[in-house]
Amino acid sequence: MKKIVLSGIRPTGQLHLGNYLGALQKFVRMQQEGIYDSFFFIADLHALTTQPDPALLHSNVRHIVAEYLAAGLDPDKSTIFVQSDVPEIPELYLLLNMHVGIGELMRTAAFKDKARKQLGITVSHDDDDNDVAREIIGNESNKRVNAGLLTYPTLMAVDILIQHADFVPVGKDQEQHLELTRRFARRFNSFYGVDYFKEPQNFNFGGKPVKVPGLDGSGKMGKSEGNCIYLVDEDKALRKKVMRAVTDAGPTEPNQPMAEPVENLFTLLRLVSTPDKVEFFTNAYNNCEIRYGDLKKEIAEDILKITAPIRERTKEIENDEQYLARVLKQGAEQARERAAKTLADVRGIMGITPFWK
Ligand code: TRP
């Protein structure tokens, strides 16, 4: 039996270089290994937790499917599907929620961040869990935190458990959700005295999870920070963004430690360029001879080597309605096969089976 790989991305906009290097590139590599049964999907139900515009959500789903295919995911090798095309997922989500504690959901880091954003409260990471709970419960403004956001981890656990995934390649920010998934699996198994759900693991090809820095000097690449490079950026726009990346006045003494914005540029360079270039610019920095303009030019050109072909293929695929429909229909059918079996098993285990069959 092949090991099962599964991962997904929320369709909140066009994919950026962080999504590609942190997730999509890994998906393609795992597919190419040829030893896994792999599932890659678009988590459109998860996107509803932030109440997107319906037309925009729909076009984002289509766009990201095109980007998946353009980046090398192949419907003949992987199951590529849209989460909402698998109705077994929301049903299992209802069932699993009966074993999930609201306290453990409220203590999830991603929930605390997003809940506070929805309430318009500034986010600070070292706040006490109880403070956050009090803020949410005691909030009397007309803003609210929706229940879907609270149960986001249940839905994600279901995505994973319904396919019995062994490996779930995700970035560092998703590790807590994966830990909860394992906990829910163990709890279900022990409550019903079964050995049914597997505990999924992250997968990083033996390395550390990649963290792609943004261009504004601090933090990671993420569209909310407006510091990112999209896979579909045109050459000129992309070069301009990189040339504008934050740096400093340059080193004044040999082997000076790098400030964060400069360190970030070197991280990008290591991700997209050859070891020779990394060595060249590291030496230039250490000898105080570095010209940031040259460094940025190289970074921009090497990013374009990766993104330009994906961009061109995305444009072609995105306009091929028939092809997209075919891929997603096939993907939904394949994804539903195992999902239906899991749902039937779980209904049986929980005692929810019809009397009339
Ligand atoms: N929560 C993930 C993210 O924000 C997306 C996601 C939803 C996911 N369901 C998943 C990732 C299942 C892996 C497996 O990136």
Image (cartoon, rainbow, N blue to C red):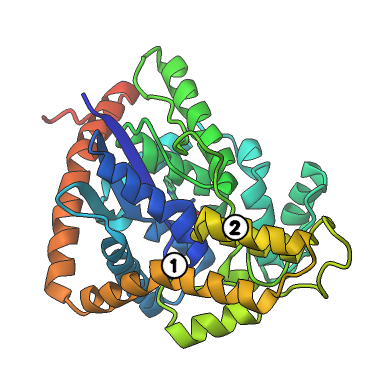
- The N terminus - image quarter: top left
Disc 1 marks a residue whose amino acid type is Leu
Quarter-of-image position of residue 35: top left
Residue 122, image x and y in percent?
Answer: 78, 64
Residue 245 visible in the picture: no
Taking depth in this image into account, of 78 and 344 the one nearest to the observer is: 78
Q: Is residue 338 left or right of residue 265?
A: left
Q: Is residue 269 above or below residue 201?
A: below
Query: Is 353 or 109 nearer to us in this picture?
Result: 109
Tell me the element at label 2: helix
Which quadrant: the C terminus? top left
- For numbered disc 1, what is the local secondary structure? loop
Mark 1 / mark 2, whichever is N-terminal: 1
- Foreground mark, 1 or 2? 2
Circle on res. 278: 2
Which residue in the protein does label 1 denote? 15
- Identify which residue is drawn at 47% across, 56% down: 21
